[in-house]
Amino acid sequence: MIALVIRCGVSVVLVVATLYALRHYWFTLNRLFGSQLHPYVDIDTADWPNVTVLIPAHNEELVIAQLLNALLKVNYPPDRLLILPINDRSEDRTGEIINDFAGRFPNRIRPFHRQSGEGGKAAALRDAMELIDDEIVLVFDADYIPGRGLIKQLVAPFFDPGVGAVMGRVVPWNVGRNCLTRLLDLERAGGYQVDQQARMNMRLVPLFGGTAGGLRKSAVAAVGGWDPNTLTEDTDITFRLVLAGWEVVYQNRSECYEEVPENWYSRIRQIQRWAKGHNQALARYSFPLMKHKNSTFAQRIDGLFLLAVYAMPVLILAGWLLALLSFYIDGESLSGILSMLGISAYTSVGNFAPFFEIAAAMRLDRTRRKILLMPLNIFGFLVSLMAVTQATVSQTLFPFWRGSFIWHKTERSANRAA
Amino acid sequence: MNELLASTFLFGVAILCFGLPLVPTIVELRKRGAARPLSVDRTNEGEIRHFANTFKTLLESNFRNPTFRECLDQGVDLQGTFNDGTPYRVLRSTTGMFAPATPDSRSIPELIIFSGPSVVPASLEFVHGLYAAEDIDCGKKTVVRSLYGARNVRLREGAVVLRWIHADNELVAGAGCELYGRASAEESMRVGRGVEFERLYAPRIVFENAGIAGPAHVLDRTPQQFVKIKATRMAGRCYAIDEDLDLPPNSLIHGDFVVRGDVTIGRNSRVEGSIKSQKRICIQRGATIQGSVIGGELEIESDCRIRGPVVASSEMIIHTGCRLGDEMHPTSVTAPYILVDPGVLAFGTVWARERGRVGGLIAH
């Protein structure tokens, strides 16, 4: 009986992992051979609306200046672009740097010094949204470096009245720092170049990533505004917008440089925060999404897969354990299933970016030499597997230990972009 | 064989089998050959004049003594080779200076710079770029790879532009021209019947007889009346409509509308906002849209006015007398396939991702 239960468990894991793998294959094939949807990138001339750029910044003295400098150089009409850096209870020189810029560019930069209130990016954004009048709001994390044309590219989709949020492509600039940054470069390429664009092509649910993107203020207000009780405000707002009938748009050609974590500790904390936030969203939105009548069947299924992506490592690990147990209890060899499970797990979890997606991204980006690092991706996968599992288990078993969620900021490097 | 030796051999082979595939990885990790960030073009920005500006910069950088400006002002005839090996000629005019590669060929092998007004004979083919400091008139069936006109540019019937063309003043493309790539003008552009195009930009683009698309407004003077439509408010002034939207003639509605079905905006109606549908949108004669129009397939009947961006994900047909954008509100009109009737006036960008054509039919 126990053996049968274990075998059933293994089979369930196997089926789910295989479905994820098929989904990734589908995305990859679509990206390589399907028709690509970039409906708004051709809008290069327009009566551009007023826009506010929000920059949530908590202890960002190392990077905030380069972002402000980059934003001051964009080709958006200056009289229609307000830059609003949010100095969110910083203890370093962030506030001082922002004030310096605001003093030099008083008509373009309006600082918001947030001295108290709840912690976290969502709370900072919620408070800042109350200060602005513009309908279009762009959000950049402080370590991002937008190009001259990025603001127009991100604003263009909002001429479509059905668009609630827009997401650009994130490209790491500190790639060459060490092995981790190079692996994260591969992962980001697969995730954005293939996963997100394929979702856009197939009119599924591209994810608003919380930075290098924009939102329609009235749409955010209509779905209840930013929720400070979430660790991934971006996933949360994405699904609330989708459930309210708004479209989330991904623009692969709107690239923006970012700084990826340079040490494993930061990386693990980052992915654990993402995992907890995604799992929160999974609990909140999976059933409403399944019942959502205005979403297509494909959107609902893909949305569910997207929400459950950080539950997969736990499932995979459980599957491995069950398979081993089955081997010893049952006495029969499960090596075939076990190896299939391993392959499925590897191809389906790696934080959205299985190896074939990465390979496709390298081909599309014409950076094929980077593919040589692919075998090392297994380390990233294993670390993600353990870190996400730990986060998910602690979140599931001890949900009330810490009271409210703690938002860990990703550490910045002292090394500046070239 | 010694057991120890055999075991060691086996172990070594196993290590080799697993290790050899990792050699390129380790080499790459150490040599860091691909450790640079993805190259993101942060200067082009999709700017339509990008190639024209680059071309002009290239010319300026290749003339040191005399400078490019001096060269044009002095009006001397020059001949030489640029640093990259491209042969060039600077000419005052077009009179008797062309030397095609072979007697049968009409191909001009040099990059040509005209310092004075020029009239290019018909059917010549310019393999390299063409720069005209004054007005230039290209004869019938001229083929140019690229052309920068510092004043007015006129392309006679059947001329072909392979990459890009830019005029600092006015660009006129005669009937049946083929404009591949980018075509831009700083002041205005006139595009003749039968012209095929991809990407056009000018503050004012006239598709052939634009007198038709003059300032006169809708032909039907029947007063518009507010109509109530069944819609769900999404946020602010944005509404969702779960079925087809069929707006009767002479209607007036306020707000932005996201429609799940087909859309028909009745004759002489007015929408004080934007319209979006992933299906078919038909804007009937004389209708006015104050915002943007985003559709799957889009047909804009004659004499319509649309102020905001117009986007179709498959095909767009624009009938005579339509006015897209205005002087104060330039806009973008984009679709994979665009068919424009003569008599349309556009302000800003008209971008056919696959193919655009003035009059006739589009072959997909």
Image (cartoon, helix red, strand yellow):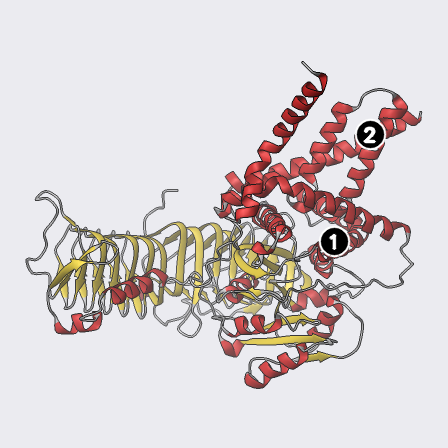
Q: Residue at x 93, y 27 (%)?
A: A2
Q: Is residue A122 left or right of residue B178?
A: right
The residue that mark 2 highlights is A323
Q: Residue flagged by tag 2: what amino acid is it? A: Ala
Disc ID at residue A220: none
Percent from the top left, x then y, of residue B180?
A: 32, 52
The residue that mark 1 highlights is A268
Both labels 1 and 2 in a single chain:
yes
Percent from the top left, x then y, of residue A215?
A: 63, 64
Q: Is residue B303 left or right of residue A361?
A: left
- Please tell me whether mark 1 or mark 2 is closer to you in this view: 1
A318 is higher (above) or lower (below) than A408: above
Percent from the top left, x then y, of residue A360?
A: 54, 41
Q: Chain of mark 1?
A: A
Give the image quarter of residue B153.
bottom left
Q: Residue furthest right?
A: A1
